[in-house]
Amino acid sequence: MAQLKKPVFLVLLFLCLSASAYSQTNGVEEAQPAGGVSTLALEYFKIRFTREQKKLLQNRDLEFLYSIAADGTATLEKIDGVTNPTILDSLTLASGRLHKFKPRKVNGVAENGLYGMTIRFPSPMAMGIQGAQEYTQTAYEGFEYIHRSGQRFDIIFGGVANTFLGKAGDYLGAGGGMKLEMLYAGKKGVGGGMLMSFYGNGLTQDFPIASDRKQNAAPPTLMLGLAANKMLASKERREFLLQLELNYVVQNITPKENEQDENWTQFHGFSPGLVAHYAVQLGKPKAYYYYGTPSLYHHYLNFHVALRPMFMNHRNASGTMAEAGVSYRLGVHLVDEYRIK
């Protein structure tokens, strides 16, 4: 019986020591970012590095070491993996804006600690076919980080309502039509493009012309031109821009009976215009490849108003066109950096 007591005592001692060790290990919580490592890494991916700096960072592992105070304040202690002083300054500056960490705790008591993180800056274009497929198959929420370069292509197609002021308003009533715009904008929000609009306005009285031919009941007006625009405000789901236009204008006043008809009447002239666009995003952006470049497709409901002075070769057709419309707008935003979760 005495011989059994010693082994039993040793087993009980081992269990007690194990329980004590487990309790001590289980009572330690290491420091960590309050929003997780992805949120912490995003602070560095947001930095607007120059093209040359991005080349230095591509496919390079950067190691960060922080000291975490008991109140959760993080202080950057060291960065390994890059020596460029300008890049180091940018990384250090971003580190000064970090949110507080969850501090290290021992048995529920906060104390000073350390935290280390390694990140790799992505290579924007070195994706290959497999990477392109992965990009296009990723939902917008599946990106840890995605940065639009500022370059974009837009196609606008929709309907308009219009009326004429001045002399032209004495002969043409309210009407409507359709418009098509193809636009490009650069990284600073300045762009331009090509325009085409088609209108039909009811004839309220005949134009005084040297022809007894019956005039069109709703003389069609066609505008072809160029535009320059500037993005004035861009929020997460709304955009506002102003656009200056210069259009060539033609109006068919009498029908053209055949290709050899030389007696039909057509007015022509030019029209500068000022247009305000307000776009509301529909749904979520879709990742897509545009001519080998990663991009985001956005769908918008586009509202616009416009004033277009018209200088025609017949003084009674000159005046100002007032216009308002609703259109579908497809925006293709080019992407220069991203990271998939």
Image: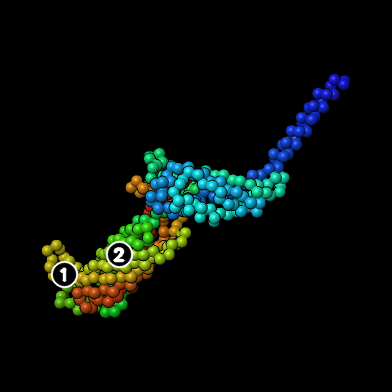
Residue farthest to the right, as pictured = 1
Residue type at the position of mark 2: Ala
- The image quarter containing residue 214 is bottom left
Q: Residue at x 26, y 71 (%)?
A: 271
Residue type at the position of mark 1: Trp
Q: Is residue 11 visible?
A: yes
Numbered circles on residues, count? 2
Q: Residue at x 17, y 73 (%)?
A: 213
Q: How is the image coloured?
A: rainbow
Q: Which mark is residue 72?
A: none
How far apart are the alpha carbons under marks 1 and 2? 31 Å
Q: Nearer the viewer, mark 1 or mark 2?
A: 2
Instruction: Name the element at disc 2.
Output: strand
- The image quarter containing residue 129 is top left
**Residue placed most toward the observer, 184 or 13:** 13
Q: Earlier in the sequence, mark 1 or mark 2?
A: 2
- The residue that mark 2 highlights is 227
Q: Residue at x 36, y 56 (%)?
A: 151
Q: Give percent across and percent down for residue 17.
A: 76, 33
- The residue that mark 1 highlights is 264
Q: Give percent across and percent down for residue 269.
A: 22, 71
**Residue placed most toward the observer, 93 or 202:** 93
Looking at the image, residue 333 lies above or below residue 165: above
Q: Give percent across and percent down for residue 18.
A: 74, 33
Looking at the image, residue 142 lies above or below residue 301: above
**Residue placed most toward the observer, 169 or 320:** 320
**Label 2: few (<14), some or many (≥20) within 10 Å?**
many
Q: Residue at x 67, y 49 (%)?
A: 111
